[in-house]
Image: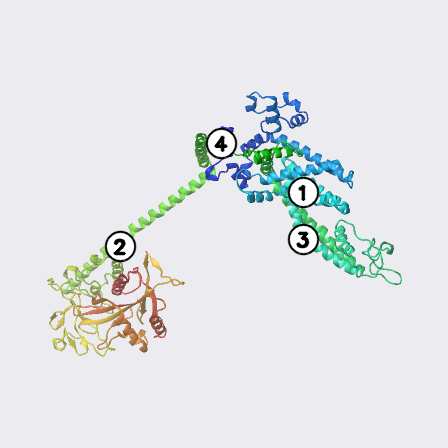
Amino acid sequence: GVFTDCYRKDEERAQKLLTRISEAWGKTTCLQLALEAKNMNFVSHGGVQAFLTKVWWGKLSVDNGLWRVITCMLFFPLLYTNLITFSREKRLQPMGCLARLRAFFTAPIVIFLMNILSYFTFLLLFAYVLMVDFQPVPSWREYLIYFWLFSLVCEETRQLLYDPDGLGVVKMASLYIKDFWNKLDICAILVFIAGLTCRLIPSTLYPGRIILSLAFIIFCLRLMHIFTVSKTLGPKIIIVKRMMKDVFFFLFLLAVWVVSFGVAKQAILIHNEERVEWLFRGVVYHSYLTIFGQIPSYIDGVNFNIDQCSPNGTDPYKPKCPETNADNKKPIFPEWLTVILLCLYLLFTNILLLNLLIAMFNYTFQQVQEHTDQIWKFQRHDLIEEYHGRPPAPPPLILLSHLQLLLRRGLLRRPATHHKLKEKLEKNEEAALLSWEMYLKENYLQHQQCQEKQNTEQMIRDIAQRVDVLAELLDLDRVKRTGVVEQRLGSLEDQVHQSAQALRWMMQALQGNGFSSGEDVPPVGSSKALDTKEVEMEGKPEESRPPYHVLARNLLYPGSHTLRFPVPDEKVPWEVDFPLYNPPAFSAEHKDMAVQDPFSLSLESLLKINYNTMDGLIDRQSFHGLYAVQDGLPLNPMGRTGLRGRGRLHCFGPNHALHPVVTRWRRNLDGSIIRKSLKKMLEVLVAQYPLSDVWALPGGSLEPGEMLPLKLKWILRREFWPQFQNLLKQGTEVHKGYLDDPRNTDNAWVETVAISVHFDTQNDVEMKRLNSFLQGCDPELCIRWQVLDKRIPLHANHKELLHKVSTLLGAYY
């Protein structure tokens, strides 16, 4: 990374980056952060290891061999020869005798070797005293061991209280306890103190020697910490530490089998053994030794010898005899059962559990072995840092260093000199160092970008990204072209429609002048095309829509074979002169209607009708005011339609209708309102009546004297009619007047009142009641809640009403 480039350019500056104290990082260093994060990759870097090696050798040259250092350590006058070389900085300066001695004996590697020599001497002297010179009255050698141990205790106390960063005693104590080797030191010292206490009491002299022997074992285990500096033995010690954890958990499994087999064997063979020590031997000790092949001779009864045991368990040096026959002293326990138990026990312990332990050891070994170099380099730092800040004199001479430290801190009140791998730089030097690091970082990033561009995988990813962009552009172009084609097709349909209207007008004109044919007139255009055009016009604003009725001028009158007289847009108003206007007449007869106007256009029958007023039960008043009456026939206030008569409507003049628009919000399963284009979506109640292919609003023409349309009564139960009338009174009127209907003629037209009934909450009582009455209506009717959208399959004039409702509620359309 960046540090690699820094180390290649300038080793000295790179090492300053490692030890530079950063205020932004809590007065810590880059190296300390890597150690806290246990970043072995960084710590094992060649530049970091070169720095640690430089610290390890101190003022000595790293080119010195280990044998030279040991030789000069034993025969220090050789320092004044050329046997030992010093670092480049020291070689450039003349060094005196004392300076050479100080530079040599303060080097961490020399301090480490002297402490090893001191520690081996301590162990040899300790072993000699335990085995040869352990007298009731301590000898001078034993007192020397006590003095030596006192120096070790003082050094451990110094390490505990050593606080160069000002963290506090509690924090330093917690850091001290976390280290495994410090725990081992404390354990060894406490066991030694316990043994020394017993040793100084004459009555507990022998227990004291036993405890001191245990302390010697712990002191010997402490030697493993010394070997962590070795590249060969260091990782192996780490493997041993991790394997000890594996053994600890393995012992739980092994104890289950040992205790279970031991208790069963003891209960089957021996009757009422009351001696605790022999119980432990029979249950645990003998069962454990069986794993290693020491099988008891009496377990199968073949090699049983009564002289090797005590029949009543009275001999303290012999185990109690197994169950035997009182006559011939032969064992009577079930030998077949003990043999089977023994075989099963050996099968599970020797084959299963021990192989499991070997597999666990192998896994731990492979894990550490794969990262041997990194682990050793990471552990090496702790040892180097410890001896870098350690006093140069080894125990027990280290007490002189402790005395000097005590005098300086206690009496002279001088601050202690801390030997830490930290360096506080001047502001100018630190700024120059950071600028140099920033420059190399930018170069490194540019180099990485160039390598990524040249990388085959990166090139493939770039090509794939470009292909995706091209594919998106092609899809977008295809969509654009499709839109252009659709636009052209729509324009072509408009032209065909206009041509069909012109041809129809021409055919009607020719027929009116006597130019006719014996064959039927071929159909020109279709209502489906007109409906498509009307659907497209739904999305247009009102000012762009035609100012006159459109559906009322469809050439083919619905429900008949009658063709309207073509009426251009500019000829629709009655005020415009249209001499050629000669519309056909059509009035359908409704046999199921009790009240309807005559279908004959004779003047005698038409004079009986009273227009612009209430004609009995029939309301002939228009919402648009007074309408004109010509030759006994009312004129459509919206203009010509191309057809005379009343068509399929019931009455001449206005035919009043009612269209309730019942809506609710469209919701998810969790009750939240669904939105589209940031607007709430509606659901409208629609119905499909028998013999009809399209959906419509639940409403229609009002019968004379009725308040609700007949079609609406088909949908609702009779008991709900009054409640629905109340809902209509509470609703909002969205339209009142002329309705562009395909059934309209020159003399009869539809005028409707559209009322919006909206249920705002999903728990509305009236909506639930309405749904319950809808479920029990006529099975021939189809009723549903339809999502309100401009593409809804509904009558075109009904869509205009829905558009007004959606605008009123601010909903999506």
Q: Residues within 10 Å of mark 1 (few under 14, many from 20)?
A: some
Q: Between marks 4 and 2, how big is the CA–CA gap?
A: 68 Å
Element type at marker 3?
Answer: helix
What residue is pinned by disc 1? 189
Residue 5: mark in rendering: 4
Report the quarter where the C terminus lies.
bottom left
Which mark identifies residue 490?
2
Q: Which residue is mark 3?
A: 252
Q: Position of residue 631 (x, y in %)?
A: 11, 72
- Residue 684 location (% of width, % of height): 31, 66
Number of the front mark, 4 or 3: 3
Residue 686 x, y percent position in the rendering: 31, 68
Q: Nearer the viewer, mark 2 or mark 1?
A: 1
Tell me if 333 is positioned left or right of 95 in this view.
right
Q: Nearer the viewer, mark 2 or mark 3?
A: 3
Q: Nearer the viewer, residue 793 or 51?
A: 51
Tell me the kind of residue under disc 3.
Phe
* Mark before the other along the chain sequence, 2 or 1: 1
Is residue 233 visible in this depiction of the protein?
Answer: no
Sequence order check, earlier mark of 4 and 1: 4
Mark 2 surroundings within 10 Å by alpha-carbon count, few (fewer than 14), some (14 through 19), many (20 or more): some
Q: Is residue 330 at least partly visible in the picture?
A: yes
Kind of residue at badge 2 = Gly
Task: Determine the image quadrant of residue 730.
Answer: bottom left
Numbered label tally: 4
- Occupied quadrant, residue 675: bottom left
Element type at marker 4? helix
In this view of the protein, which residue sits in the foreground, 676 or 64? 64
Relative placement, left or right, of 40 versus 234 is: left
Label 2, label 1: how far apart the Cα atoms are: 100 Å
Which of the two residues, 629 or 448, is positioned nearer the viewer here? 448
